[in-house]
Image (cartoon, rainbow, N blue to C red):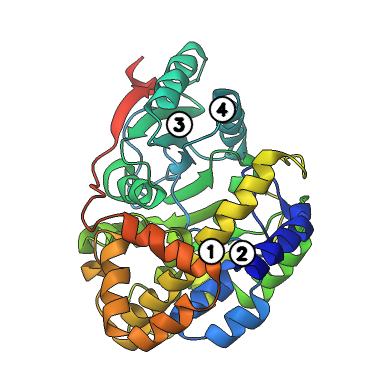
Amino acid sequence: MLLDVLGVIMLGFAAGLAVRGRPRLLTMQPICGMALRDIAGGMAMAIRSGSGMQQRLSPAGIESASGSAAVAPDAGGPGAWSVTIFAARESTEELLRTIEAACQAVRERPVHLEVMVNGNESLARKLAALVEQRSWPSAQARVRVWFAPLGDKSNTWNAALHQVWDGEELAFFIDGYVTLLPGALDVMGREVLADTQALGGTATPSGGRGDAAVRRAMLKDGGMHGNLCCLKASTVRELRQRGIRLPCGLYRGDGLMGAFLAIRLDPHADWVPGRIHVVDRPSWSVPRRPLLSLASWRTVWNRRIRQARGRFENLALKDWLRVRCLPLEQLPTDIESLLTSWAQTHDEEFQRELRRDWFARRAWRDVQAHAIGTRVPGPARLLWSSASR
């Protein structure tokens, strides 16, 4: 145990060079393409070359700028796009900057901005009050602020797809601390829509520590980046019609959404990374944090535990999607159910992973701390909308 702890401290020091914004250990967290291959069956490659990057998300649509119902893509004329902003622990100032940048990232279409704050009602209400004081011209964007009571990003993903999405042609998803570059989503959206094979898209990072390595891996192996991704309307429709949702409590929810795209929402389908269109243009950035701050070290430590938990998730999801090829619609509503069931039926594999290091054992204790069924998913509540002015 002592060696494990000393090892992660040394790794954390080296990986601190990659800590940014809501810090992400690019040298320790598997890139989405590799993590998805864990699920698909390529564990060796994931472990060998995936000691590095953040998992990636699926795209989410941008809503229309008019504040009225979004224009469906088959209704004629340029369809509206939506941008969903996932938030939980950001400051109101940070979120306001993110919203304003998102407004400038789409200039060619009506855009709907959906700010979804999970588990932090105080932040959601403060943000709604501040946004209400701003001027949001209906000709440019519609802005809405939502609160999802369950503090869980996967549940917020489900609410965004099954409740909030309004039929927009493209649905973009970004994290609350991401700053989009002007016009970036116009470029990304054109590329994704032009790629007839793609179900969604993502964009390589630019300008941050460690971003060059992330970019090379994305271009080589595919995958989705959780900071910025998008889904086509046809993809969101099928997710809705079939009732496909991410299990609540899932750490690697962004990666699982990418896996859904790579297999075309069909566990029996071939694994095709090209179903996620990777845009290789400067489009977004995240703020950096002091390398030696206490908050950064705490984040390094907590993320190391979550990564260990993510390894259990990959094994259980690999068994569900690629070994037993079970329907996506039947995934348990909470990750604890899936992990517990997998551990009971794969004891040898489970024990081997449990012996791997102290972090694995600590991560499993966290899994056991959440009794099955205690995560109660629920709808998001609309707190404010510029359309109601």
Callout 2: 10 Å neighbours few (<14), some, many (20+)?
many
Whether residue 182 is visible, yes or no, is: no
Would residue 41 be visible to someone looking at this image?
Answer: yes
Disc 3: which residue: 65
Asked if the residue under mark 2 is in contact with the one under mark 1, i.e. CB atoms within 8 Å, the reply is yes
First in residue order: circle 3 vs circle 4: 3
Position of residue 181 measured from the top left corner of the image (x, y, whole percent): 68, 41
**Quadrant location of the N terminus in the rendered image:** bottom right
Residue shown at the point (75%, 66%) measured from the top left: 213
Task: Kindly identify which residue carries mark 4.
Answer: 91
Query: Residue 228 shows which numbered tag?
Result: none
- The circle on residue 29 is 2
The picture places residue 335, in percent across and down from the top left corner, at 32, 62
Which numbered disc flags the more N-terminal residue, 2 or 4? 2
Q: Amino acid at mark 3?
A: Ala
Q: Nearer the viewer, mark 1 or mark 2?
A: 1
| Amino acid type indicated by mark 1 | Gln
Give me the C-alpha separation between circle 2 and circle 4: 25 Å
Mark 4 surroundings: few (<14), some (14-19) or many (≥20) residues within 10 A: some
Q: Nearer the viewer, residue 206 or 15?
A: 15
223 or 70, which lies in front? 223
Choose mark 3 or mark 4, whichever is in front. 4
Q: Which residue is mark 1?
A: 307
Asked which secondary structure carries label 4, the reply is loop
Marks 3 and 4 close (CB-CB < 8 Å): no
Q: CA distance from mark 1 to mark 2?
A: 7 Å
Q: Residue at x 23, y 58 (%)?
A: 372
Q: Quadrant of the C terminus?
A: top left
Helix or strand or loop: what does disc 2 sit on? loop
Q: What amino acid type should be assigned to the residue bearing mark 4?
A: Ser
Of the image marks 1 and 4, the number of the one nearer the N terminus: 4
Give the amino acid type for the residue marked by disc 2 in the picture. Gln
